[in-house]
Image (cartoon, rainbow, N blue to C red):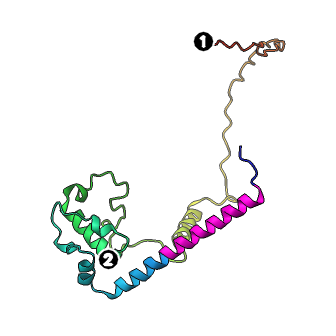
Amino acid sequence: MTQARDFWSRRKAAVQAEAEAEVIAAEEQAIVAQQAELEEKSDAEILAEFNLPDPDQLQVGDDVSGFMAKAVPDRLRRRALRRLWRLNPVLANVDGLVDYGEDYTDAACVIENIPTAYQVGKGMLAHIEALAAESEESEPDPVTEEPEPEVIDEPTPEPVVTAEAEAPEEVDLRPTPRRMKFEFEG
């Protein structure tokens, strides 16, 4: 269970959290300033500054860990990773375990200018109205002659006699109380 901290311990924790936040903010500002400087330089200058090879010239077995440093711009990191993925057959092979790796759209089955009854903004309104009009025309008028229903004489079924069971007395099925037993190995 946690204990209630007094005022001074909470204050000390708050001051420490503020100091940590200031350090993190200063590091982020330094990284942003360094990224801004690197954005002005060309890729060749950046590669020479960090002693990195050209990412497009990487070969199988070359080390790409230098490109993963925070100081290296994203554009160079991505170029190196793309080259690595193209070179390494293990990384380039999609093994079929990607859930949504296939194209599930029906773009291949779509026929251009397909005639439909659907109207944009109206849906299938005209088609449904036409079907309703056809069904009204085919139905007989309820006011005109209706055929009289035929009366069929069926034998009346015999009543089924059921025996009523007596209601069982309510039985109290409470669990029996037990005592806990402890055994100590000694």
Circle 2 crowding by C-alpha within 10 Å: few under 14, some 14–19, many from 20: few
Give the image quarter of residue 44. bottom left
Q: Does residue 58 appear anywhere in the picture?
A: yes
Give the main secondary structure, helix, strand or loop, of the magenta stretch.
helix
Residue positioned 40% across, 81% down in the render: 34
* x and y, in percent, of residue 172 in the image: 82, 14
Q: Does residue 123 appear anywhere in the picture?
A: no
Q: Which mark is residue 75?
A: 2
Residue positioned 33% across, 62% down in the render: 103
Q: Quadrant of the N terminus?
A: top right
Q: Is residue 35 left or right of residue 126?
A: left
Q: Is residue 26 left or right of residue 150?
A: left
**Vertical relation: 117 (above or below) 184:** below
- Residue type at mark 1 is Glu
Residue extent of the magenta highlight: 6-27
**Vertical relation: 139 (above or below) 128:** above
Identify the element where label 1 is drawn. Answer: loop
- Residue type at mark 2 is Arg
Give the image quarter of residue 80. bottom left
Identify the element where label 2 is drawn. Answer: helix
Residue positioned 32% across, 65% down in the render: 109
Q: Which residue is mark 1?
A: 185
The magenta stretch spans residue 10: yes
Q: Quadrant of the C terminus?
A: top right
Front-lying residue, 84 or 160: 84
Circle 1 crowding by C-alpha within 10 Å: few under 14, some 14–19, many from 20: few
* x and y, in percent, of residue 73 in the image: 34, 76
